[in-house]
Structure formats: structure tokens, C-alpha cells
């Protein structure tokens, strides 16, 4: 890809006390590109997500948005700059409606005096929610239903739909297909492709290698906090990707 990355980590290092979680990590993300981020448990994937989303400040290195060096003081700052993140195991609020979840922290008030009194514009939020989720390919009737009435797959679709709908530049999804069945995962992967087609840069983390192989344009492999591979996804086979992740071939991996 010739054009400059939309978002980049350069030489990022991060330790927790004596545990080195990331060491000199580079990751470049282009608009309209899905980058798969893979690695064994403890490889540093979630830590990198937290650096990219402004939860953690790196100990070394920096992030660059549109080529400009940034130092997020909070996740809110990264969010304001157009970077949406779905954290691993982050949930929705089950007792709120779908549209209340989509507008969580971004509630819209009624125009005029009622708004000044803090009255929410539920009608407008419901309409926008339906429109936004539809736009990203999440088909849900009854956005005023409470989330606790939805299936696991529908909840995940709402969580991803919310992130994709608000994202202006970058969306980071940490294991969004975990705990989902095949059909539900397929729906999530479809939402990811739609996000790419809208020109967003997408970071997709998954342990399910077939999902990574079928959905991403490029794959970055982390092992013990270092990038050990960064290649077009089409150059990997399931076996070579597993080998990059573990350092072992599939046969050897089956033995250990
Ligand atoms: N809050 C934390 N405090 C201490 N160590 C942590 C913390 N979060 C992660 N780690 C450690 O950092 C390393 C990378 O973890 P993580 O980024 O969660 O990896 P992954 O998401 O690839 O499984 C691991 O050794 C993990 O135990
Ligand atoms: Mg993780």
C-alpha cells in the first residue's frame, strides 16, 4: 500500500513492573485496511490495544495519527480523535435499551427548554441508532428493547455496531468473535468488512486463525511482546501462521 498510514505505533515499549509486555513494536494501519493482530496468550495484544486507544501511555516510542505524533492523556482523547475501541470482554449495560447503549456517554437532549432541564431525546436517539446500526450492517428491530433480551450474538453485534458507527478513522476490536457461534461470527466479520469498505482502518484481534485469514488484509504476529511477522495475509497458510505465532510447526505444536 503506497499511501501513508492513518494510524501508527512506532517503537512502542510497555512494561508492567518487571514484566515487559511490549518491546519496540511497530504497527502501521492504513485507511480501508483490516490488520489482523495475533499472538499467543500474554503476547501483548491487549497491551498494544490499550496503548493505541489511550488507556496506557507507552514507556518508549509513540503513536502517530495521520502522521502527527500524539500522546493521549486519556482514552477519551483518542476517542475524540476518531479512534473507537472494543475492549476484550467489554460488555454492554444489560439493563439499558439498545439505543441507550449506543448513545452511552453521548446522550442527546431534547431541543429547547426540556433539553436544558436534562430531558433525553429518546425518539431521536432511537431513530439514529436504527440508522447507524443499519448502515454498518447490523439488522435489529426494536432498538428500545433492553439488551438483556438479546442473544449473545445480537449483543456483540450491537457492541461492534456501536463502535463502527461512531468511528471516524480507526476501529480496534479485541477478540470480538470470542464466545460466538459460527453464524454469529460470520455476521461480525461482515460488519468488519463493511467498516473497511467505509474507509476505516481496522485492527482485528482473534485467536480463530481462519477468521483472521479470511477477513484481514495484513497480519501482524506478536510473540512475547515483539513483532515477529508483518506480512500480507495472503502470504500465510494456516500452518505458517501457527508457526509464526508459536515458533513451532503444527505437528510439533500438537506434541507439546
Ligand atoms: N495490568 C497488568 N499488570 C501486570 N501485568 C500485566 C497486566 N496486563 C497484562 N500484563 C502482562 O503483560 C503481558 C501481555 O499481556 P496482554 O497484553 O494481556 O497479552 P495478550 O492480550 O496478547 O494475551 C502478559 O505477560 C501479562 O501477564
Ligand atoms: Mg488479550
Image (cartoon, rainbow, N blue to C red):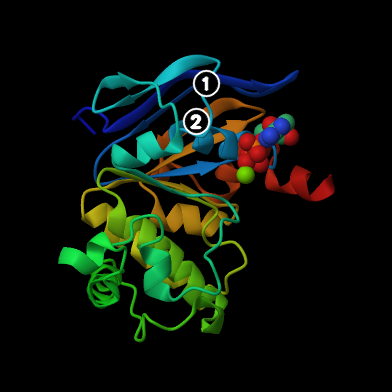
Q: Position of residue 27 (x, y in %)?
A: 42, 29
Tell me which corner region of the image, top left, top right, bottom left or bottom right, holds residue 107: bottom left
Residue drawn at point x = 56 percent, y = 19 percent: 13
Q: CA distance from mark 1 to mark 2?
A: 6 Å
Along the viewing direction, whichever of 251 and 36 lies nearer the viewer: 36
**Which quarter of the figure is the C terminus placed in?**
top right
- Mark 1 and mark 2 residues within 8 Å of each other at the beta carbon: yes
Residue at point 60%, 47% (across, down): 239
Left or right: where does residue 207 sit relative to residue 25?
right
10 Å crowding of disc 2: few (<14), some (14-19), many (20+): many
Marker disc for residue 51: 2
Seen as rendered, the residue at the extreme right is 256
Residue 130 image point, x, y percent: 27, 76
Image quadrant assignment for residue 160: bottom left
User: Which structural element holds mark 1?
Assistant: loop
Picture quarter with ligand 1: top right
Above or below for 185 versus 164: below
Residue 175 appearing in the image? yes
In terms of image quadrants, where is residue 18?
top right
Instruction: Tell me where residue 57 appears, x and y as whole percent.
Output: 51, 23
Which is more toward the observer, 247 or 33?
33
Is residue 134 shown left or right of residue 179?
left
Q: Is residue 111 visible?
A: no
Point out which mark residue 243 bears. Answer: none
* Residue plotted at (49% across, 73% down): 96
Residue that badge 1 annotates = 58
Q: Earlier in the sequence, mark 1 or mark 2?
A: 2
Amino acid at each position: 500500500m503506497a499511501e501513508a498510514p492513518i494510524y501508527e505505533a512506532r517503537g512502542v515499549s510497555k512494561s508492567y513492573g518487571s514484566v515487559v509486555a511490549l518491546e519496540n513494536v511497530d504497527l502501521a494501519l492504513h485507511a480501508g485496511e483490516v490488520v489482523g493482530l495475533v499472538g499467543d496468550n500474554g503476547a501483548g495484544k491487549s497491551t498494544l490495544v490499550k496503548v493505541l486507544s489511550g488507556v496506557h501511555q507507552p514507556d518508549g516510542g509513540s503513536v502517530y495519527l495521520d502522521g502527527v505524533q500524539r500522546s493521549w492523556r486519556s482514552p477519551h482523547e483518542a476517542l475524540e480523535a476518531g479512534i473507537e475501541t472494543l475492549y476484550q470482554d467489554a460488555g454492554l449495560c444489560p439493563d439499558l435499551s439498545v439505543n441507550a447503549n449506543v448513545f452511552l456517554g453521548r446522550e442527546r437532549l431534547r431541543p429547547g427548554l426540556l433539553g436544558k432541564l436534562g430531558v433525553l431525546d429518546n425518539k431521536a436517539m432511537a431513530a439514529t441508532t436504527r440508522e447507524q446500526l443499519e448502515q454498518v450492517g447490523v439488522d435489529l428491530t426494536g432498538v428500545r428493547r433492553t439488551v438483556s433480551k438479546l442473544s449473545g450474538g445480537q449483543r456483540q453485534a450491537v457492541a461492534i455496531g456501536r463502535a463502527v458507527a461512531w468511528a471516524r478513522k480507526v476501529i480496534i476490536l479485541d477478540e470480538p468473535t470470542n464466545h460466538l457461534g459460527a453464524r454469529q461470527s460470520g455476521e461480525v466479520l461482515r460488519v468488519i468488512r463493511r467498516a473497511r469498505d467505509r474507509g476505516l482502518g481496522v485492527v482485528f484481534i482473534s485467536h480463530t486463525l481462519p477468521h483472521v485469514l479470511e477477513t484481514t488484509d495484513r497480519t501482524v504476529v506478536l510473540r512475547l511482546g515483539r513483532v515477529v511477522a508483518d506480512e500480507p495475509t495472503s502470504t500465510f497458510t494456516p500452518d505458517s501462521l501457527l508457526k509464526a505465532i508459536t515458533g513451532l510447526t503444527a505437528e510439533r505444536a500438537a506434541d507439546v
